[in-house]
Protein backbone atom coordinates (compact mmCIF):
# COMPACT_ATOMS: atom_id res chain seq x y z
CA UNK A 1 0.00 0.00 0.00
CA UNK A 2 1.25 3.45 -0.97
CA UNK A 3 2.38 5.55 2.01
CA UNK A 4 1.46 9.23 2.26
CA UNK A 5 5.07 10.14 1.52
CA UNK A 6 5.12 7.96 -1.60
CA UNK A 7 1.80 9.48 -2.64
CA UNK A 8 3.25 12.98 -2.36
CA UNK A 9 6.31 12.04 -4.42
CA UNK A 10 4.11 10.52 -7.14
CA UNK A 11 1.68 13.44 -7.22
CA UNK A 12 4.49 15.95 -7.22
CA UNK A 13 5.90 14.38 -10.38
CA UNK A 14 2.48 14.12 -12.03
CA UNK A 15 1.68 17.78 -11.30
CA UNK A 16 5.20 19.10 -11.98
CA UNK A 17 5.07 20.56 -8.49
CA UNK A 18 7.63 21.86 -6.01
CA UNK A 19 7.18 21.92 -2.23
CA UNK A 20 8.52 24.89 -0.27
CA UNK A 21 8.52 24.81 3.53
CA UNK A 22 9.38 27.36 6.18
CA UNK A 23 11.85 26.59 8.95
CA UNK A 24 8.99 26.55 11.48
CA UNK A 25 7.00 23.76 9.83
CA UNK A 26 6.69 20.22 11.22
CA UNK A 27 9.87 18.10 10.87
CA UNK A 28 8.24 15.61 8.48
CA UNK A 29 7.08 18.48 6.27
CA UNK A 30 10.56 19.94 6.17
CA UNK A 31 11.96 16.53 5.30
CA UNK A 32 9.71 16.05 2.27
CA UNK A 33 10.09 19.62 0.97
CA UNK A 34 12.28 20.46 -2.00
CA UNK A 35 13.48 23.60 -0.26
CA UNK A 36 13.38 24.71 3.38
CA UNK A 37 14.27 28.23 4.44
CA UNK A 38 13.34 31.61 5.83
CA UNK A 39 10.99 34.12 4.20
CA UNK A 40 13.65 35.71 2.01
CA UNK A 41 15.07 32.39 0.84
CA UNK A 42 11.62 31.01 0.08
CA UNK A 43 10.65 34.15 -1.84
CA UNK A 44 13.75 33.87 -3.96
CA UNK A 45 13.25 30.15 -4.52
CA UNK A 46 9.68 30.80 -5.68
CA UNK A 47 11.03 32.95 -8.52
CA UNK A 48 13.58 30.33 -9.61
CA UNK A 49 11.42 27.24 -9.94
CA UNK A 50 10.38 25.78 -13.30
CA UNK A 51 7.50 23.92 -11.65
CA UNK A 52 3.93 24.58 -12.72
CA UNK A 53 2.64 24.15 -9.19
CA UNK A 54 4.04 25.53 -5.92
CA UNK A 55 2.87 23.92 -2.70
CA UNK A 56 3.70 26.43 0.00
CA UNK A 57 3.97 25.04 3.52
CA UNK A 58 3.81 27.98 5.86
CA UNK A 59 1.24 30.68 6.55
CA UNK A 60 -1.05 32.48 4.13
CA UNK A 61 1.05 35.59 3.53
CA UNK A 62 3.93 33.39 2.34
CA UNK A 63 1.77 31.66 -0.25
CA UNK A 64 0.41 35.04 -1.33
CA UNK A 65 3.95 36.32 -1.83
CA UNK A 66 4.73 33.33 -4.02
CA UNK A 67 1.62 34.09 -6.09
CA UNK A 68 2.61 37.76 -6.44
CA UNK A 69 5.96 36.66 -7.84
CA UNK A 70 4.45 33.88 -9.99
CA UNK A 71 0.96 34.98 -11.10
CA UNK A 72 1.00 32.48 -13.96
CA UNK A 73 1.68 29.50 -11.66
CA UNK A 74 -0.69 27.60 -9.41
CA UNK A 75 0.15 28.17 -5.74
CA UNK A 76 -1.48 25.77 -3.29
CA UNK A 77 -1.76 26.23 0.47
CA UNK A 78 -2.11 22.99 2.46
CA UNK A 79 -4.35 24.69 5.04
CA UNK A 80 -5.88 28.13 4.28
CA UNK A 81 -6.59 28.59 7.99
CA UNK A 82 -2.84 28.97 8.63
CA UNK A 83 -3.05 32.71 9.19
CA UNK A 84 -0.20 34.79 10.63
CA UNK A 85 -1.52 36.85 13.54
CA UNK A 86 0.94 39.66 12.88
CA UNK A 87 -0.24 40.01 9.29
CA UNK A 88 -3.73 40.78 10.61
CA UNK A 89 -2.47 43.71 12.70
CA UNK A 90 -2.29 46.04 9.71
CA UNK A 91 -4.77 46.92 6.94
CA UNK A 92 -4.39 48.72 3.60
CA UNK A 93 -6.63 51.51 4.85
CA UNK A 94 -4.42 52.01 7.91
CA UNK A 95 -1.32 52.24 5.73
CA UNK A 96 -2.95 54.84 3.49
CA UNK A 97 -3.92 56.89 6.56
CA UNK A 98 -0.42 56.58 8.04
CA UNK A 99 1.11 57.78 4.78
CA UNK A 100 -1.14 60.85 4.85
CA UNK A 101 -0.06 61.61 8.43
CA UNK A 102 3.62 61.25 7.53
CA UNK A 103 4.22 62.96 4.18
CA UNK A 104 7.61 62.29 2.63
CA UNK A 105 8.16 58.99 4.43
CA UNK A 106 8.35 55.71 2.53
CA UNK A 107 6.34 52.72 3.67
CA UNK A 108 8.58 49.77 4.49
CA UNK A 109 6.56 46.63 5.08
CA UNK A 110 7.69 43.42 6.67
CA UNK A 111 6.93 40.47 4.40
CA UNK A 112 4.70 39.18 7.23
CA UNK A 113 1.75 41.11 5.82
CA UNK A 114 -1.16 40.51 3.49
CA UNK A 115 -0.97 40.95 -0.26
CA UNK A 116 -3.42 43.85 -0.02
CA UNK A 117 -1.10 45.60 2.42
CA UNK A 118 1.93 44.96 0.22
CA UNK A 119 0.11 46.76 -2.59
CA UNK A 120 0.23 49.94 -0.47
CA UNK A 121 3.95 49.70 0.37
CA UNK A 122 7.00 51.23 -1.27
CA UNK A 123 9.23 48.29 -0.42
CA UNK A 124 9.00 45.01 1.49
CA UNK A 125 11.68 43.53 3.68
CA UNK A 126 12.43 40.41 5.68
CA UNK A 127 14.26 39.96 8.96
CA UNK A 128 17.34 39.20 6.83
CA UNK A 129 17.45 42.54 5.06
CA UNK A 130 15.35 45.02 7.09
CA UNK A 131 18.38 47.10 8.11
CA UNK A 132 19.74 47.10 4.56
CA UNK A 133 16.36 48.16 3.16
CA UNK A 134 15.80 51.01 5.67
CA UNK A 135 19.37 52.31 5.35
CA UNK A 136 19.12 52.42 1.54
CA UNK A 137 15.92 54.50 1.40
CA UNK A 138 16.19 57.66 -0.65
CA UNK A 139 13.88 59.49 1.75
CA UNK A 140 14.91 60.62 5.23
CA UNK A 141 12.33 58.47 6.98
CA UNK A 142 10.08 55.45 6.93
CA UNK A 143 6.78 54.10 8.18
CA UNK A 144 7.66 50.55 9.25
CA UNK A 145 4.74 48.09 9.32
CA UNK A 146 3.54 45.89 10.94
CA UNK A 147 6.21 44.60 13.38
CA UNK A 148 7.25 47.11 16.04
CA UNK A 149 10.10 44.92 17.26
CA UNK A 150 11.76 44.45 13.87
CA UNK A 151 11.04 48.10 13.06
CA UNK A 152 12.69 49.28 16.27
CA UNK A 153 15.67 47.00 15.64
CA UNK A 154 16.11 48.43 12.14
CA UNK A 155 15.65 52.00 13.37
CA UNK A 156 18.34 51.55 16.04
CA UNK A 157 20.75 50.46 13.32
CA UNK A 158 19.82 53.37 11.03
CA UNK A 159 20.01 56.48 13.27
CA UNK A 160 20.01 58.81 10.27
CA UNK A 161 16.49 57.66 9.32
CA UNK A 162 13.36 58.91 11.07
CA UNK A 163 11.37 55.69 11.46
CA UNK A 164 7.73 55.63 12.55
CA UNK A 165 7.12 52.16 13.98
CA UNK A 166 3.76 50.35 13.78
CA UNK A 167 2.26 48.71 16.85
CA UNK A 168 2.08 45.13 15.58
CA UNK A 169 4.03 42.11 16.73
CA UNK A 170 4.48 38.36 16.42
CA UNK A 171 2.71 36.81 19.42
CA UNK A 172 5.23 33.97 19.51
CA UNK A 173 8.34 36.13 19.65
CA UNK A 174 6.59 38.69 21.85
CA UNK A 175 5.91 35.93 24.38
CA UNK A 176 9.63 35.37 24.92
CA UNK A 177 10.41 37.29 28.11
CA UNK A 178 13.54 38.55 29.82
CA UNK A 179 12.79 36.15 32.66
CA UNK A 180 12.62 33.16 30.30
CA UNK A 181 15.94 34.11 28.74
CA UNK A 182 17.53 34.65 32.16
CA UNK A 183 16.35 31.21 33.28
CA UNK A 184 17.74 29.59 30.13
CA UNK A 185 21.08 31.34 30.57
CA UNK A 186 21.24 30.25 34.21
CA UNK A 187 20.52 26.65 33.20
CA UNK A 188 22.99 26.74 30.29
CA UNK A 189 25.73 29.22 31.25
CA UNK A 190 28.06 28.19 28.42
CA UNK A 191 25.43 28.57 25.71
CA UNK A 192 25.52 31.32 23.12
CA UNK A 193 22.25 33.26 22.81
CA UNK A 194 20.77 33.75 19.34
CA UNK A 195 17.67 35.94 18.96
CA UNK A 196 15.27 36.64 16.10
CA UNK A 197 14.72 40.42 15.61
CA UNK A 198 10.96 39.90 16.07
CA UNK A 199 11.77 39.57 19.79
CA UNK A 200 11.32 42.46 22.21
CA UNK A 201 14.14 45.01 22.39
CA UNK A 202 15.01 44.07 25.97
CA UNK A 203 15.32 40.43 24.89
CA UNK A 204 17.53 41.35 21.93
CA UNK A 205 19.80 43.20 24.34
CA UNK A 206 20.48 39.85 26.05
CA UNK A 207 21.56 38.13 22.83
CA UNK A 208 25.02 37.43 21.49
CA UNK A 209 23.76 37.18 17.91
CA UNK A 210 20.66 38.75 16.35
CA UNK A 211 19.37 37.58 13.00
CA UNK A 212 16.96 35.67 10.81
CA UNK A 213 16.53 31.93 11.08
CA UNK A 214 18.94 31.50 8.18
CA UNK A 215 21.57 33.58 9.96
CA UNK A 216 21.02 31.48 13.08
CA UNK A 217 21.56 28.29 11.10
CA UNK A 218 24.74 29.54 9.46
CA UNK A 219 26.11 30.78 12.79
CA UNK A 220 25.43 27.52 14.63
CA UNK A 221 26.94 25.52 11.81
CA UNK A 222 30.18 27.53 11.70
CA UNK A 223 30.57 28.36 15.40
CA UNK A 224 33.08 26.62 17.63
CA UNK A 225 30.43 26.68 20.35
CA UNK A 226 28.49 23.49 20.99
CA UNK A 227 25.50 24.84 22.94
CA UNK A 228 22.99 27.48 21.92
CA UNK A 229 19.91 29.18 23.31
CA UNK A 230 17.76 29.99 20.28
CA UNK A 231 15.09 32.64 20.74
CA UNK A 232 12.66 31.85 17.97
CA UNK A 233 9.92 29.35 17.10
CA UNK A 234 10.74 25.76 18.09
CA UNK A 235 10.30 24.38 14.57
CA UNK A 236 13.76 25.75 13.83
CA UNK A 237 15.11 23.04 16.09
CA UNK A 238 14.70 20.32 13.46
CA UNK A 239 16.77 22.11 10.85
CA UNK A 240 19.44 22.97 13.41
CA UNK A 241 19.63 19.35 14.57
CA UNK A 242 19.98 18.10 10.98
CA UNK A 243 22.66 20.64 10.07
CA UNK A 244 24.50 20.89 13.38
CA UNK A 245 24.90 17.32 14.68
CA UNK A 246 26.37 17.00 18.13
CA UNK A 247 25.37 20.51 19.19
CA UNK A 248 22.78 21.23 21.91
CA UNK A 249 19.91 23.62 21.15
CA UNK A 250 17.55 25.11 23.76
CA UNK A 251 14.30 26.99 23.06
CA UNK A 252 11.91 29.06 25.22
CA UNK A 253 8.92 26.98 26.29
CA UNK A 254 6.41 29.48 24.88
CA UNK A 255 7.77 29.65 21.33
CA UNK A 256 5.27 27.46 19.45
CA UNK A 257 3.28 28.75 16.45
CA UNK A 258 0.16 26.65 15.80
CA UNK A 259 -0.39 28.19 12.36
CA UNK A 260 3.04 27.04 11.20
CA UNK A 261 2.20 23.48 12.22
CA UNK A 262 -1.01 23.25 10.17
CA UNK A 263 0.66 21.93 7.03
CA UNK A 264 0.94 18.14 7.36
CA UNK A 265 1.87 15.31 5.01
CA UNK A 266 -1.83 14.52 4.72
CA UNK A 267 -2.84 18.06 3.75
CA UNK A 268 0.03 18.30 1.26
CA UNK A 269 -1.09 15.06 -0.41
CA UNK A 270 -4.70 16.25 -0.42
CA UNK A 271 -4.03 19.56 -2.16
CA UNK A 272 -1.82 17.86 -4.73
CA UNK A 273 -4.45 15.21 -5.38
CA UNK A 274 -7.36 17.64 -5.72
CA UNK A 275 -5.47 20.81 -6.72
CA UNK A 276 -7.37 22.44 -3.87
CA UNK A 277 -6.81 25.62 -1.87
CA UNK A 278 -5.28 27.63 -4.72
CA UNK A 279 -4.18 31.15 -3.81
CA UNK A 280 -6.25 33.65 -5.75
CA UNK A 281 -5.51 37.37 -5.70
CA UNK A 282 -7.03 40.31 -7.62
CA UNK A 283 -4.92 41.21 -10.65
CA UNK A 284 -4.64 44.81 -9.44
CA UNK A 285 -3.25 43.70 -6.08
CA UNK A 286 -0.70 41.42 -7.75
CA UNK A 287 0.40 44.20 -10.10
CA UNK A 288 0.79 46.81 -7.35
CA UNK A 289 2.38 44.46 -4.81
CA UNK A 290 4.96 43.02 -7.18
CA UNK A 291 7.35 45.98 -7.21
CA UNK A 292 7.78 46.26 -3.41
CA UNK A 293 8.24 42.48 -3.21
CA UNK A 294 10.74 42.45 -6.06
CA UNK A 295 12.65 45.28 -4.41
CA UNK A 296 12.83 43.09 -1.29
CA UNK A 297 14.49 40.22 -3.11
CA UNK A 298 16.75 42.49 -5.15
CA UNK A 299 15.07 42.14 -8.51
CA UNK A 300 14.40 45.80 -9.29
Image (cartoon, rainbow, N blue to C red):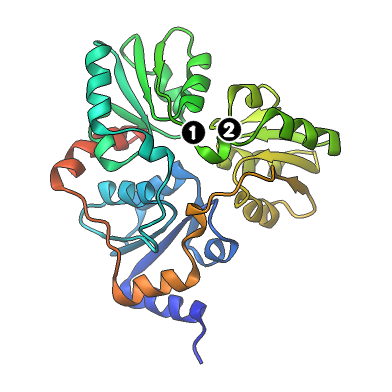
On the question of residue 188 being in view, the answer is no
Residue at point 84% right, 33% down? 186
The answer to whether residue 42 is left or right of residue 183 is: left
Q: Percent x, y for residue 50?
A: 32, 60
Characterize the local packing of mark 1: few (<14), some (14-19) or many (20 or more) Cα atoms within 10 angstroms: many
Measured in 3D between alpha carbons, the distance from the residue under mark 2 to the one under mark 1, in whole angstroms, is 7 Å
Residue 270 appears at what percent x and percent y? 38, 74
Q: Is residue 75 above or below residue 191?
A: below
Number of residues whose C-alpha sits closer than 10 Å to that of mark 2, classed few (under 14), some (14–19) or many (20 or more): some
For residue 107, say whether it is visible.
Answer: yes
First in residue order: circle 2 vs circle 1: 1
SS state under label 1: loop
- Residue at screen point 44% across, 35% down: 126
Specify the farthest residue to the left: 284
At x 74%, y 47%, the residue is: 249
Which x, y percent locates residue 207?
Answer: 69, 27
267 or 32: nearer the viewer:
267
| Residue position for label 2 | 211
Amino acid sequence: MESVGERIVRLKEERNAVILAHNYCLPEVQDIADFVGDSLGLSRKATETDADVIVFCGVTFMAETAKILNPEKTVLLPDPAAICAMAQMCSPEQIIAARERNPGKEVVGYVNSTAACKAEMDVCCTSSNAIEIVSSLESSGAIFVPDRNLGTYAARSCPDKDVVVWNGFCPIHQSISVQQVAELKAAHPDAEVLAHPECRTEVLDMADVIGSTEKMLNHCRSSDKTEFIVLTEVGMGHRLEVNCPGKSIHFPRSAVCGAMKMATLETIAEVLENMSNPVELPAEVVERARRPVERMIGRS
